[in-house]
Image (cartoon, grey):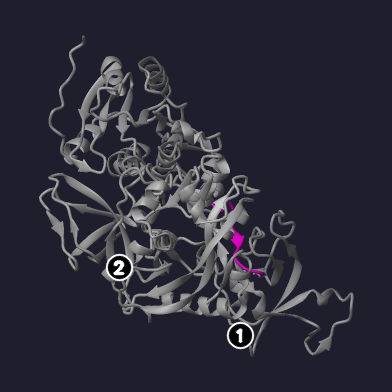
């Protein structure tokens, strides 16, 4: 067996940056058409090969004259000049201006010979008489103009080379090409631009369970859609690189080796995600050691501890963790800066915001924590910060967080009210106008569509109330009976019909809750934080009372009672797949999926506002939208089983 490098101690974040900085990601230079140059970085200096403009040109509409012919002219005593012709932009002049003469000229036209200034048309007048004598049509003297202002030589004329002189330095190396630079290059006649190459980055996601988005997903086999390939590819492009997606690699050594070597031969940098933990079943560690040089394995940072850094042939290699939040965090923190440097791009302007922790957050794990954080404002506009941490495997953390708070390794906790700095994911990140938590609901989704910039965290009614009591969210949506109450302001709501979703046609003949207890039916429940689960449990208690039986005996008889799903459609979709005979859900869900429904009751959905935020504009906007629903009912009327309170 080959001796392996031992990485018993996690590297510091600084050591990880140094290891990546030691890799050679620099691409070769290239020339691109002007039409493709926007956003690229100029590789070498460009000098002007011609004057811009290449001729003396009029800078406004008017008359080309000899400046000395206008000296002394004013409104009371204009100078009369003979017209000798007209010069249009894009045409070569066919006239010459001599003493006492003028030529009509358009903006941008070449100055005719003899003329050295332009009088704007507003300070002139076509003559209809001369010397007190009316000029008849056809009179040679009719081609004359009165000039009512004096101009000096060069007035209203852009001289050749006044914009850019031939031989002058136009743009220097390292210039980021924007629309402004495109305009200058166009004026210089440059049609091919020498630019720094974009580092090519090959992306390989590992794991037999991955399926490309758009492909057929077989959940029964544990398959999931590939998140990392597309997330990291977008990050590569944003950092100035050029991403190439390679096929998925399974956990087979030969397949992994073939894909990684192929990517290394074609790209400046290879990024893989997954298969970087210390587990013995992971093979990518061995591939890099066998075919390249492993420089680092593991970084003292959370999330994202299992990171690899090394070389594979002539290519650089970085192995990212498999969980999406960890992978993107490590990429943004360590890899994106190296790609930008190789592409010649400056570090983007750091966007940070300071705010106070809305809740107390414990930590104390002894390594740097990059804590995903969300923003919310109180009624006074002060920024509050709350942790967004569903675990590294939760993809919704990618969009529910606004930035990252770096928590030092020796920090045991962040106290409520403690000021922290949030490094935003981009400079245009703004706190949502309304932070909503609680029960997910079809009517709620339609309602939120009408608001400016809300954020909704579907944590369920029970957890929503707990968070509302903690003072973080603006509003909680609460359905069904509740075990606790918190101080809040009721903004309104609606009712919805709930019950059992069954296959179309109800083949098992389900009539009510008793069939779950007495029959051999596979049932899918909702999670304990869901309000509809509380309504269901209340119904179970009623059946137990009617039968004079223990509640425990009843729930033990229901196949699937203890395990609940998070999403309000999940039980119904399990029924639609044939994985269950019944699922807890809404009539609206059953009808939208073409399934049967057995009604068990009606429950209210209440909108509860944080009493300290009722004057916040986002809350006021929500209250107005709720009033509109109560008046016209358009949202409720479109959903089966919904009604007004």
With respect to residue 304, does 399 lie above or below? below
Which secondary structure type mostly characterizes the magenta part of the structure? loop
What is the magenta range?
52-61
Is residue 296 in sight in this rendering? Answer: yes
Q: Nearer the viewer, residue 426 or 517?
A: 517
With respect to residue 622, does 95 lie above or below? above
Q: Is residue 109 left or right of residue 51?
A: right
The image shows residue 214 at horizontal and vertical percentages of 56, 37
Q: Nearer the viewer, residue 149 or 546?
A: 546
Residue sitting at 46 percent across and 27 percent down?
246
Q: Is residue 21 left or right of residue 248?
A: left
With respect to residue 82, does 9 lie above or below? above
Instruction: Describe the element under mark 2 as helix, strand or loop.
Output: loop
The disc label shown at residue 472, or none: 2
Asked whether residue 59 is drawn in magenta, I would say yes
Is residue 30 in sight in this rendering? Answer: no
Residue sitting at 37 percent across and 28 percent down?
270
Distance, label 2 to label 1, CA atoms, is: 73 Å
With respect to residue 512, does 9 lie above or below? above
Packing grade of label 2 (10 A; few <14, some 14-19, many >=20) is many
Q: Which residue is mark 1?
A: 74
Q: Quadrant of residue 201?
A: top left
Q: Is residue 354 left or right of residue 150?
A: left
Asked whether residue 166 is drawn in magenta, I would say no
Going from N to C along the chain, the mark reached first, 2 or 1, is: 1
The image shows residue 241 at horizontal and vertical percentages of 41, 37
Q: Is residue 316 left or right of residue 407?
A: right
The image shows residue 12 at horizontal and vertical percentages of 15, 38
Residue sitting at 76 percent across and 76 percent down?
144
Instruction: Describe the element under mark 1 as helix, strand or loop.
Output: loop
Q: Nearer the viewer, residue 79 or 442?
A: 442
């Amino acid at each position: 067996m080959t001796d392996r490098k031992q990485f018993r101690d996690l590297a510091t974040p600084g050591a990880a940056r140094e290891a990546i900085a030691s890799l050679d990601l620099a691409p070769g230079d290239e020339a691109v058409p002007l039409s493709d140059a926007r956003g690229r970085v100029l590789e070498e200096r460009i000098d002007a090969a011609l004057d811009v403009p290449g001729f003396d040109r009029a800078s406004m509409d008017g008359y080309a004259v000899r400046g000395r012919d206008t000296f002394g002219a004013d409104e009371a005593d204009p100078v009369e000049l003979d017209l000798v012709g007209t010069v249009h932009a894009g045409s070569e002049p066919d006239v010459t201006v001599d003493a006492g003469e003028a030529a009509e000229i358009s903006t941008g036209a070449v100055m005719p010979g003899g003329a050295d200034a332009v009088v704007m048309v507003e300070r002139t007048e076509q003559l209809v008489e001369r010397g007190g004598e009316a000029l008849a049509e056809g009179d040679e003297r009719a081609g004359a103009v009165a000039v009512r202002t004096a101009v000096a030589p060069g007035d209203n004329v852009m001289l050749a080379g006044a914009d850019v002189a031939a031989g002058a330095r136009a743009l220097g190396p390292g210039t980021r090409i924007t629309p402004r630079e495109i305009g200058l290059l166009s004026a210089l006649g440059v049609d091919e631009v020498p630019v720094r190459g974009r580092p090519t980055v090959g992306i390989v996601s590992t794991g037999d369970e991955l399926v490309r988005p758009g492909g057929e997903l077989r959940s029964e086999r544990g398959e999931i859609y590939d998140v990392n390939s597309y997330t990291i590819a977008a990050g590569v492009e944003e950092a100035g690189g050029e991403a190439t997606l390679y096929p998925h690699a399974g956990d087979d050594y030969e397949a992994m080796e073939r894909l990684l070597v192929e990517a290394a031969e074609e790209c400046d940098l290879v990024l893989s995600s997954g298969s970087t933990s210390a587990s013995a079943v992971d093979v990518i560690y061995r591939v890099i050691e066998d075919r390249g040089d492993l420089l680092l394995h593991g970084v003292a940072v959370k999330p994202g501890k299992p990171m690899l850094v090394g070389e594979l042939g002539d290519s650089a290699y970085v192995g990212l963790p498999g969980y999406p939040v960890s992978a993107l965090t490590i990429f943004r923190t360590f890899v994106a800066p190296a790609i930008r440097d190789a592409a010649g791009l400056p570090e983007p302007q750091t966007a940070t915001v300071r705010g106070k922790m809305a809740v107390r957050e414990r930590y104390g794990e002894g390594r740097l924590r990059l804590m995903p954080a969300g923003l919310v404002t109180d009624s006074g506009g002060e920024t509050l910060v709350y942790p967004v941490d569903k675990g590294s495997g939760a993809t919704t953390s990618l969009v529910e967080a606004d930035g990252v708070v770096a928590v030092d390794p020796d920090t045991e906790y962040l106290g409520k009210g403690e000021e922290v700095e949030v490094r935003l994911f981009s400079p245009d990140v703004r706190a949502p106008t309304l932070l909503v938590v609680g029960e997910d609901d079809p009517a709620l989704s339609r309602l939120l569509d009408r608001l400016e910039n809300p954020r909704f965290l579907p944590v369920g009614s029970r957890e929503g109330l707990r968070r509302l009591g903690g003072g973080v969210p603006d509003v909680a949506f609460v359905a069904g009976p509740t075990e606790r109450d918190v101080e809040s302001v009721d903004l309104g709501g609606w009712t919805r019909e709930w019950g059992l979703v069954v296959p179309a046609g109800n083949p098992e003949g389900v009539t009510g809750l008793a069939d779950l207890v007495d029959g051999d039916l596979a049932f899918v429940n909702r999670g304990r934080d869901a309000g509809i689960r509380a309504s269901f449990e209340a119904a179970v208690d009623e059946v137990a009372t009617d039968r004079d039986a223990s509640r425990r005996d009843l729930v033990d008889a229901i196949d699937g009672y203890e395990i609940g799903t998070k999403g309000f459609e999940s039980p119904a979709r399990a029924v639609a797949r044939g994985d269950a005979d019944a699922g807890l859900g809404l009539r609206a869900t059953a009808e939208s999926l073409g399934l049967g429904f057995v009604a068990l009751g009606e429950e209210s959905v209440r909108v509860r506002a944080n009493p300290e935020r009722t004057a916040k504009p986002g809350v006021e906007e929500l209250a107005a939208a709720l009033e509109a629903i109560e008046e016209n009912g358009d949202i409720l009327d479109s959903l089966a089983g919904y009604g007004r309170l």
